């Protein structure tokens, strides 16, 4: 794997330069990353520089998760399948909910 070429080391210097160790590159983290991006784009996660929801990007990330769901069918552990299925279902529900709310405003 590409990550085998590099070691995760803290950056030398003051505390502001510290880089935490990266999590393992596994399926759960991929699902988590795409879900987090969709939640950010829907405006579900508070941010200091709060931006308006970007429904196109949110839909794209949800579509990526749905594509993974289709392409990996039958090849995941029960826990992986449940996490993916739950993420897609919940994000689709929240997308519709927030899109309707934005339209009403």
Image (cartoon, rainbow, N blue to C red):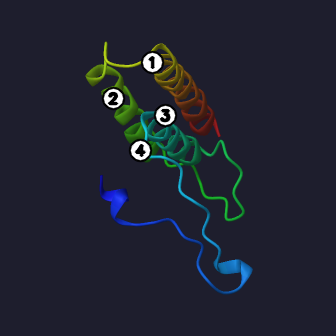
Q: Is residue 59 left or right of residue 21?
A: left
- Measured in 3D between alpha carbons, the distance from the residue under mark 1 to the one under mark 2, in whole angstroms, is 10 Å
Residue 81: numbered disc:
1
User: Mark 2 = which residue?
Assistant: 68
- Confirm or deny contact between disc 2 and disc 3 (CB under 8 A): no
Q: Earlier in the sequence, mark 1 or mark 4?
A: 4
Q: Report the Cα–Cα distance between label 2 and label 4.
A: 18 Å
* Disc 3 to disc 4, C-alpha distance: 24 Å
Q: Is residue 39 above or below residue 11?
A: above
Quote the CA–CA distance across marks 1 and 4: 25 Å
Mark 2 or mark 4, earlier in chain? 4
Q: Residues within 10 Å of mark 4 (few under 14, many from 20)?
A: few
Q: Is residue 9 left or right of residue 57?
A: right
Pointer 4: what residue?
56
Dot 3 alpha-carbon crowd within 10 angstroms: few under 14, some 14 to 19, many 20 or more: some
| 69 or 99: nearer the viewer | 69
Q: Is residue 79 shown above or below 104?
A: above
* Residue annotated with mark 3: 28
Dot 1 alpha-carbon crowd within 10 angstroms: few under 14, some 14 to 19, many 20 or more: some
Q: In the image, what residue occupies the spot 62% across and 34% down?
A: 104
Q: Along the line of sight, which residue is nearer the eye, 90 or 93?
A: 90
Q: Secondary structure at mark 3?
A: helix
**Please, which residue is most extreme toward the left here?**
71
Distance from the alpha carbon under mark 2 to that under mark 3: 12 Å
Estimate the x, y position of residue 80 in percent, counting from the top left: 47, 22
Image quadrant holding the C terminus, namely top right
């Amino acid at each position: 794997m590409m990550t085998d070429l590099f070691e995760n080391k803290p950056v030398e210097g003051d505390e502001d330069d510290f880089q935490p160790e990266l999590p393992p590159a596994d399926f759960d983290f991929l699902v988590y990353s795409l879900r987090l991006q969709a939640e950010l784009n829907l405006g579900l996660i508070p941010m200091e520089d709060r931006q308006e929801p970007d429904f196109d990007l949110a839909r794209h990330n949800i579509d990526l998760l749905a594509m993974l769901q289709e392409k990996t069918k039958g090849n995941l552990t029960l826990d992986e399948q449940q996490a993916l299925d739950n993420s897609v279902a919940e994000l689709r529900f929240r997308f519709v909910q927030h899109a309707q709310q934005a339209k009403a405003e």
